[in-house]
Amino acid sequence: QVQLVESGGGLVQPGGSLRLSCAASGSIFSFDVMGWYRQAPGKQRELVATITSSGVTNYADSVKGRFGISRDNGKNTVYLQMNSLKPEDTAVYYCNVNRLNLNTYWGQGTQVTVSS
């Protein structure tokens, strides 16, 4: 079993930056893909970014060039550096572990609000 705890959300002005962290307890394996998703009010949950244990990344087009995902395998932690934030980035951000598409684990979510 994997438990995920996110931190780092909050209120930021447009153009600002935030860094989200997600610490995983339980076993994280080299084949686990870790990532971030988000869900805005009235919208479906969507992919933000994913990263493999070897550092291969994937980003949604809407965040390319602004967000950076990284992973510390020794600490079982994944980070999301968010720069040049826009109001449309406002959402609850969820940490995710995908285990061979057989099991998926989710954190409780952290709110990110971009507003002046």
Image: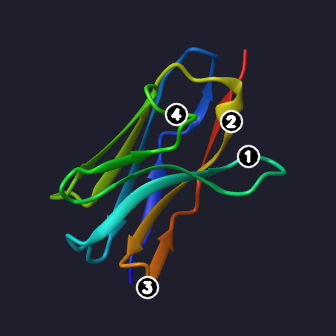
- Is there a contact, CB below 8 Å, between mark 2 and mark 1? yes
Can you tell which of label 3 and label 2 is closer to the viewer?
Answer: 3
Question: Farthest residue in the right direction?
Answer: 42
Q: Report how far apart the C-alphas of labels 3 and 1 lie in the structure.
A: 26 Å
Seen at 47% across and 47% down, the residue is 7
- Asked which quadrant contains residue 111, the reply is top right
Element carrying mark 1:
loop
Element carrying mark 2:
loop
Quick one: label 3 or label 1, which is nearer the N terminus?
A: 1
Q: Report how far apart the C-alphas of labels 2 and 1 lie in the structure.
A: 6 Å
Q: Position of residue 93 (x, y in %)?
A: 58, 49
Q: Quadrant of the C terminus?
A: top right
Q: Is residue 41 above or below residue 10?
A: below
Which amino acid type is marked by label 2? Thr
Seen at 47% across and 23% down, the residue is 83
Residue 40: assigned label = 1
Seen at 37% across and 77% down, the residue is 99
Can you tell which of label 4 and label 2 is closer to the viewer?
Answer: 4
Residue 63: assigned label = 4
Residue 90: assigned label = 2
Which amino acid type is marked by label 4? Val
Q: Position of residue 55 (x, y in %)?
A: 22, 50
Q: Report how far apart the C-alphas of labels 3 and 2 lie in the structure.
A: 30 Å
Name the residue that disc number 3 marks: 102
Q: Quadrant of the N terminus?
A: bottom left
Q: Report how far apart the C-alphas of labels 4 and 2 lie in the structure.
A: 12 Å
Seen at 37% across and 60% down, the residue is 34
